Amino acid sequence: MVNKELRNLLSGDVMEEEMLLTLGELSRACRLPAERILELVDEGVIEPQGRNPVQWVFQGVCVRRVRCAQRLQRDLGVNPAGAALALDLLEELERLRARLKRMD
Amino acid sequence: MEYKDYYKIMGVKRDATQDEIKRSYRKLARKYHPDVSKEPDAEAHFKEVGEAYEVLKDPQKRAAYDQLGANWKSGQEFRPPPDWNQGFEFRGGGFTGGDSEHFSDFFESLFGAGGLGGRYTRREFHARGEDSYARVSIDLEDAYHGAARSLTLRGTEIGPDGRPQVKERTLNVRIPKGVRQGQHIRLAKQGGAGFGQGEPGDLYLEIEFQPHPFYKVEGKDVYLNLPLAPWEAALGATVKAPTPNGTVDLKIPAHSAAGRKLRLAGRGIPAKEPGDLYVVLQIELPKADNDPAIAAYQVFAKAFQFNPRAHLGV
């Protein structure tokens, strides 16, 4: 029984750590055409490392940011700049909430 | 099936203009958007509002809905009258909206007849399955040592009749050492089943720490409030302190004030650059509830010419 459980143990990647994606991989993971990803890069929602799109690599956390930006655009009718602002504010809020929780 | 009062859900009167409906929708969508909202049941509210808007924003659907009459109450048992929507153009046209598979039976019975079934049978192409999300609660200690968790997930799959059905499955997942609050673990191909020969989607697990009785976590740093006796703080001492990795002997410098933070570098959540453990000193006063204790406090009072309110000018 124990062996069977061990055999079925699934391992995943932690998105926020050490995971690097190319533009193509990011766009597949987010199910968005590359042009939409470029829009979000222009707004600074995500920041690639590398000089040009062919060499770009994105950190795993970008998947979450792009998906969130995408949902905000679709559901709330904001444009990419508005989504970028909302994401920054949400992250700030998250940090402050964590600090508040620690102070309790 | 229960009648749904879309006007009530949207918070508008039955004679509201399309603009009023749109404004109200935008406001409610911001309030309940699952990415933004901390309201309880935000997601359920958001879906309900989305469904109401799907009907009220479309003059055809709205007119058909209005035709049911204004006497229905939310939650009332409901059957659509036969041929109730005759003469409206959307009949058989299916959905126009995005997340329509999450709409209620009520919606489906009014606008979805031939829509939902058609929606899936029309998918003759091969498409990747949907990504799914779940939350995993772990203990702080699991982040220090790694762990395995057994999760039971409920998801919808497309049954042999082409309609979605709820299925439960259990996964055993490795929780990697060093994982932090709010991080996501991606399990490739463990999401919703694909269509045709399409691959399954991915499963994303969001990590959530169970509240710990004495550790607080901020990012990869961990905080511990450590109570000291007044003489330990004043004179300095070596005291035992718990850490998620086991008890340590901690040297308290003399003249420590309450609130002083001692940093134990690298003893936070493990990583390539691990977090730190901060020990925040607190001073506990022993109770003066017996004669020797009262006498000791009196000796204290005599020994110090101490006015703790000097800086307040009194």
Image (spheres, coloured by chain):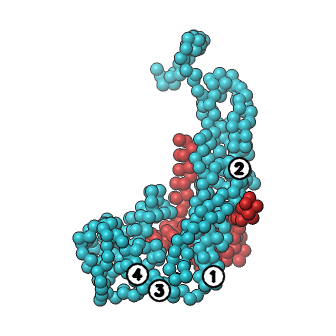
Q: Quadrant of residue B247?
A: top right
Q: Report how far apart the C-alphas of labels 3 and 2 lie in the structure.
A: 50 Å
Q: Report how far apart the C-alphas of labels 2 and 4 lie in the structure.
A: 50 Å
Dot 3 falls on a residue whose secondary structure is helix
Dot 1 falls on a residue whose secondary structure is loop
Where's residue A11, x and y in %?
Answer: 71, 64
Q: Is residue B159 visible?
A: yes
Mark 3: which amino acid? Gly
Mark 1: which amino acid? Gly
Q: Are marks 1 and 3 on the same chain?
A: yes
Judging by the rendered image, the residue that carries numbered circle 1 is: B198
Q: Quadrant of the N terminus of chain B?
A: bottom left
- Which numbered tag is attached to residue B112? 4
Circles 4 and 1: CB distance less than 8 Å? no
- Counting residues from the start of the chain, the first of labels 3 and 4 encountered is 4
Rendered position, B180 above or below B214: below
Judging by the rendered image, the residue that carries numbered circle 3 is: B118
> Badge 3: few (under 14), some or many (20 or more) residues near its Cα, within 10 Å?
some
Q: Chain A's colour?
A: red
- Which numbered tag is attached to residue A22? none
Q: Quadrant of residue B146?
A: bottom right
Determine the residue positioned at 71% across, 49% down.
Answer: B144
Left or right: residue B146 versus residue B54 is right
Q: Report how far apart the C-alphas of labels 1 and 3 lie in the structure.
A: 19 Å
